Image (spheres, grey):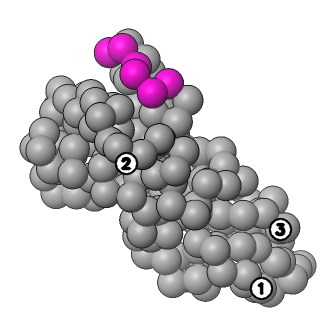
Amino acid sequence: MNDRILLNVSIDGRDCSFETETDRRLLDLLREDAGITGVREGCGEGECGACSIFLDGKLVNSCCIPAVAADGSSIVTIEGFSKTPEFDIISDAYAEAGAVQCGFCTPGFIMATAALLREIPIPDDNQIRTALSGNLCRCTGYSMIIDAVRIASKNFHSASSPLDQQYGGLNDT
Ligand code: FES
Ligand code: FES
């Protein structure tokens, strides 16, 4: 029988407690216990980025993280992130570029785009490719996704408020 542990975590701004097995994946806790199905399971092996979350502000694949490692942490999922102005700018850019087809991969790409543009507001194409290298898309062929990141970068730049004010209360993501 697996050991169980009580774990306390902030998810999308809500304080939550879960009793869970010590060998559980964070992805399973988020989807099954917290009901956050916007965090997707693709490969389950750290290759596709569909399960991306911000864990204490760092972009990680939740399929590769034990749930116990998140004890005391702050998590932002695509569901929380989708309530921010930052998400709106990025998702509008994906729509404008035609970078969404089936949409399965899109939450992960949007999270990776946010992580990139926070670190490098005006990335070149190599920096975009590197930042998105942990995400897989079966549909689009990637060029439209790269266009989407360029458009998001431009639109952040021309937005009236500074980038850090556009994070809309989830600035610790
Ligand atoms: S499901 Fe986690 S990286 Fe693919
Ligand atoms: S849009 Fe279908 S997997 Fe990317």
Residue 71 marker: 3
Asked if residue 55 lies left or right of residue 116, the reply is right
Under mark 3, the amino acid is Asp
Q: Give the range drawn in magenta.
A: 120-125
Q: For marks 3 and 2, give the one nearer the viewer.
A: 2
Residue 110 marker: 2
Q: Magenta residues: mostly which secondary structure?
A: loop
The residue positioned 82% from the left and 78% from the top of the image is: 8
Question: Mark 2 packing: few (<14 Cα in 10 Å), some, or many (20+)?
Answer: many
Alpha-carbon span between mark 3 and mark 1: 9 Å
Percent from the top left, x then y, of residue 29? Answer: 63, 75
Residue 35 marker: none
Under mark 2, the amino acid is Ile
Residue contact between numbered discs 1 and 2, judged by CB atoms under 8 Å: no
Percent from the top left, x then y, of residue 138? Answer: 22, 43
Secondary structure category for the residue under label 3:
loop
The residue positioned 32% from the left and 42% from the top of the image is: 159
Question: Mark 1 packing: few (<14 Cα in 10 Å), some, or many (20+)?
Answer: some
Q: Which of marks 3 and 1 is nearer the N terminus?
A: 1
The residue positioned 45% from the left and 27% from the top of the image is: 121
Q: In the rendered view, tell whether residue 35 sits above or below residue 105.
A: below
Secondary structure category for the residue under label 1:
strand
Q: In the rendered view, tell whether residue 79 sits above or below residue 139.
A: below
Residue 17 marker: 1
